[in-house]
Image (cartoon, rainbow, N blue to C red):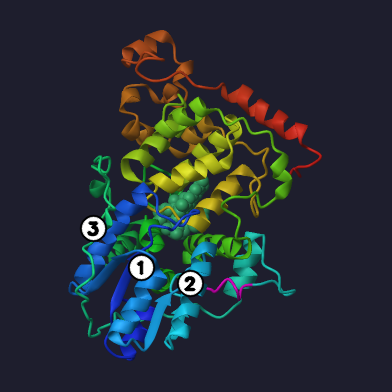
């Protein structure tokens, strides 16, 4: 979704006139089909790319092989190129398209436009993939060749196909306008991605190492949806950051980009990561999967303020701060004993940055069954996490205005507030804000007991 640092577009432009094509495949399933919030982003990203290509983005909907084969024949296309994905289903679809195109006598070339290092090349000395982040990043990535330097924006002679559809015809925007607030929070497209990066370098980067854990502050980059949709490349971010601060000062931020590489590597080498526990010993775990608890979590009505604030931020804005994602996810899988896949599915539908490798790897990390995961018995306490990372309560008050007048002392655990304090703040627990759906201490013990029942099968770290 970008003109600059786009290896496939650059190659196409060197080969003659370019027919720029976007195909939405309605048959896409199994975690690759975008969720509702992602579709919203995709719509606006296509509008932006189309404008940047002078209205010459040719949009199609259908089976990609059939559409490409028709275009190849009509235009006498000599070469087809794209930046490949490392997602398993997309890779197998690409294989079929490559075979079909080669049978038509067309040259095909695909490029890495989305990762700093190719997961096929970041391997341990014995040729197997890494399962632990630090050696993956330090030995596998940083010791390897420096990432490719970003390429300049492409100028090409673009062609317009008259049979192409309009972006509206893809039907990506919701029929019920639940997205009303999204445009207050996001500006979509390549130039906005660069504006976001510049803003982060100017105002966030210097505070990042400490400030990235504070959900009320704007110290993280918020580049994740732009990165997911390829409006900006990790290479552009990597080098822009390093131009502004030393490698040492950039380390913590760059290692977060490293986690993105790690997730992609995990998905590439373990393609069933979105469905199956990476640590198969967790298959024996006694999940409870209570439907009403799941609904309360989804709606931000668990009665635990930090979790509810996160879930409401997600619903209202399509995003949730990373610290709160960890707390809300831990609450679901540990305090509620609901399978991480239910949480991952909800995030997939509601996040504008929903990303198969990052989402699957992060959920498995929180659940304790993933690579380099937090041990299962380490259970985030949403009350102490709130006091530590949202000390003034600004984040909670933004998303839970009904608790706005509660003093900080009780904001993270309103059930502990005396009746008079609640009344003074205009709160009737169970009416204006829910009572907690579980007791934090008891549910923590229940999770530990559940682990103990399977302890011969589940390693403790
Ligand atoms: C349960 C759970 C689910 C998640 N699902 C997703 C998802 O679907 N899509 C997604 O992009 N991220 C996901 N993350 C990771 C992380 O929360 C987001 O990448 C981050 O919050 C995005 O905000 P930012 O751009 O301001 O990040 P910054 O802190 O500015 O980091 C810069 C970039 O590094 C990458 N990054 C940062 N943290 C991580 C991480 N822990 N793992 C992998 N990459 C990371 C992102 O691409 C991010 O844009 C998930 C985390 C958890 C705990």
SS at circle 1: loop
Mark 1 or mark 2, which has the lower sequence index? 2
Which residue is pictured at 36% across the width and 53% down the height?
Answer: 38
Q: Does the magenta run of residues contain 397?
A: no
> As drawn, is 292 to the left or to the right of 21?
right
Give the position of the N terminus as an image quadrant: bottom left
Crowd band around label 3 with a 10 angstrom C-alpha radius: few (<14), some (14–19), many (20+): few
Disc 2/disc 3 C-alpha distance (Å): 24 Å
Examine the residues drawn in magenta and state their main secondary structure.
Answer: loop
Q: Kindly identify which numbered label has been placed on residue 255.
A: none
Q: CA distance from mark 1 to mark 2?
A: 22 Å
Q: What residue did someone put label 3 on? A: 169
Image side of residue 111 versus residue 51, left or right: right
Does the Cβ of the disc 1 residue fall within 8 Å of ligand 1?
A: no
Q: Could you tell me how many numbered marks the image carries?
A: 3
Position of 435 relative to 114 (above/below): above
For mark 2, what is the residue? 94
């Amino acid at each position: 979704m970008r003109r600059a640092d786009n290896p496939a577009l650059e190659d196409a432009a060197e080969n003659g006139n370019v027919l720029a094509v976007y195909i939405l495949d309605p048959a896409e399933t199994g975690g690759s089909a975008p969720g509702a919030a992602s579709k919203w982003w995709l719509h606006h990203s296509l509008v932006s790319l189309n404008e940047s290509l002078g209205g010459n983005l040719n949009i199609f909907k259908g089976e990609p092989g059939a559409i490409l084969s028709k275009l190849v024949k009509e235009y006498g296309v000599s070469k087809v190129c794209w930046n490949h994905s490392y997602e398993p289903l997309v890779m197998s679809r690409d294989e079929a398209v490559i075979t079909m195109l080669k049978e038509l006598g067309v040259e095909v070339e695909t490029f890495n436009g989305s990762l700093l290092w190719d997961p096929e090349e970041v391997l341990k000395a014995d040729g197997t993939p890494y399962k632990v982040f630090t050696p993956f990043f330090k030995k596998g990535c940083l010791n390897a060749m420096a990432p490719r330097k970003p390429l300049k924006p492409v100028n090409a002679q673009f062609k317009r196909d008259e049979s192409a559809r309009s972006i509206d015809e893809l039907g990506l925007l919701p029929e019920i306008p639940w997205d009303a607030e999204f445009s207050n929070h996001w500006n979509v497209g390549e130039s906005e991605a660069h504006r976001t990066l510049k803003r982060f370098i100017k105002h966030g980067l210097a505070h990042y190492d400490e400030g990235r854990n504070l959900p009320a502050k704007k110290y993280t980059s918020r580049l994740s949806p732009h990165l997911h949709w390829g409006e900006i490349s990790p290479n552009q971010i990597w080098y822009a950051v390093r131009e502004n601060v030393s490698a040492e000062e950039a380390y913590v931020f760059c290692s977060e980009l490293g986690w993105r590489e790690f997730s992609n590597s995990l998905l590439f080498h373990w393609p069933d990561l979105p469905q199956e526990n990476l640590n198969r010993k967790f298959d024996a775990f006694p999940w409870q999967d209570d439907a009403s608890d799941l609904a309360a979590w989804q709606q931000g009505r668990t009665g635990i303020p930090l979790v509810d604030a996160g879930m409401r931020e997600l619903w209202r804005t399509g995003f949730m701060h990373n610290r709160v994602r960890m707390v809300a996810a831990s609450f679901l899988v540990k305090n509620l004993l609901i399978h991480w896949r239910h949480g991952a599915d909800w995030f997939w539908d509601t996040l504008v940055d929903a990303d198969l490798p990052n989402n699957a790897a992060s959920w498995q990390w929180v659940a304790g069954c993933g690579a380099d995961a937090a041990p299962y018995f380490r259970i985030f306490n949403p009350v102490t996490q709130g006091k530590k990372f949202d000390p003034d309560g600004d984040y909670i008050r933004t998303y839970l205005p009904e608790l706005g007048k509660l003093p900080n002392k009780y904001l993270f655990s309103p059930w502990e507030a005396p009746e008079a304090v609640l009344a003074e703040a205009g709160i009737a627990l169970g009416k204006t804000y829910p009572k907690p759906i579980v007791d934090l201490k008891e549910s923590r013990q229940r999770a530990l007991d559940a682990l103990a029942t399977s302890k011969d099968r589940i390693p403790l770290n």
